[in-house]
Image (spheres, helix red, strand yellow):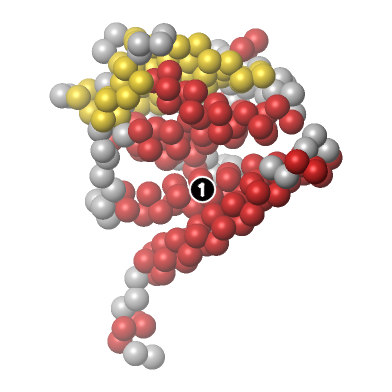
Amino acid sequence: MSNDAQNLDFATVIASAVHDMKNSLTLLLDTLDDAAGEQSIAATLLQEKLLQAQHEGKRLNRNLIQLLALYRLERSQLFINITENSVTELLEDVAMESRQLLDARSIKLEIDCESGLIGFFDRELITGIVNTIINNSYRYTKNTIRLSGENQGDYLCIHIEDNGPGYPDKMLHGGSNTDSPIDFQTGSTGLGLYFAAQVAQMHSNGKRHGYTETSNAGINKGGRFSLFLP
C-alpha cells in the first residue's frame, strides 16, 4: 500500500463522496421537478407520488449539505456571511418552495410576521434551517404549519410550529444546548436540530450568541422549533 493511501484522511474521502452524491441528487431532483410540473399529470395520483419522491429527495439533499457544512465547521472552514434581511420575505420564499407539496396533502401553511421585521444573519444557512424544520413538520403535522418571526428582547426569533403530536421528550431542549439528540433505538440522528444549533451559535453580537429551542408549545400543543439570533 502506498504512503498516500496510508495517510489518506477518511473524513475527506467521505466528504468528497457526499459532494458527488449531492450533485447527482440535484440532477435527479431537477428531473422530478420537470415531471411533476407536466400539465398532463396535474392533480393526479402520479403527481402526488412524484411530489412525495421530490420531497424525500430534497430531505436527503439537505442532509448531505448539512454533513458537508459540519465537516467544514469541524475544520474551521465554514464561515458565515451576515447580511441585512427581511424576515417576512425569507419566510414567504421558503413557503413558496414548499407550497405545492403541502397543498397536495391539504396542509395549510400560515405566516405570521410583521412586514418590516429585519434581521442580520446568513440568509442561505438560515433558509436551510427553516426548510429542514418544515420538512420535519410535514411528516408529523395533522394539517397546519405556522411560520412566524418577532423580536424578543435583544434577539430575533423565528418559530416553526405545527399541530402534530409534538416533540418526544428526548428531543426537547433549550438555551445554548448544542448536543446532538442521537437516539440509536429509534434511528433518529437529530442531524437537522444539531446543525441548526451549531449555525445559531455561529451568529453572535458582542457576547451574545444565537441558540435554538424545541418545545411542545406549538399549535394545539404541537411541536415548536424556535431559532434565536442576536
Disc 1: CA contacts within 10 A as few (<14), some (14-19) or many (>=20):
some
Q: Residue at x 52, y 36 (%)?
A: 132
* Residue 76 as seen in the image, left or right of residue 133: left
Instruction: Judge by depth and name the residue closer to the eye, 103 or 147.
Output: 103
Furthest-bottom residue in this view: 1
Q: Residue at x 70, y 27 (%)?
A: 103
**Can see residue 104?**
yes
Quadrant position of the N terminus in the picture: bottom left
Residue 7 in picture, x, y percent from top left? 31, 78
Residue 118, quarter of picture: top left
Residue under circle 1?
A: 63
> Which amino acid is tagged 1?
Asn
Residue 36 in picture, x, y percent from top left? 71, 44
Q: Residue at x 34, y 90 (%)?
A: 2
Q: Residue at x 54, y 55 (%)?
A: 26
**Can see residue 174?**
no
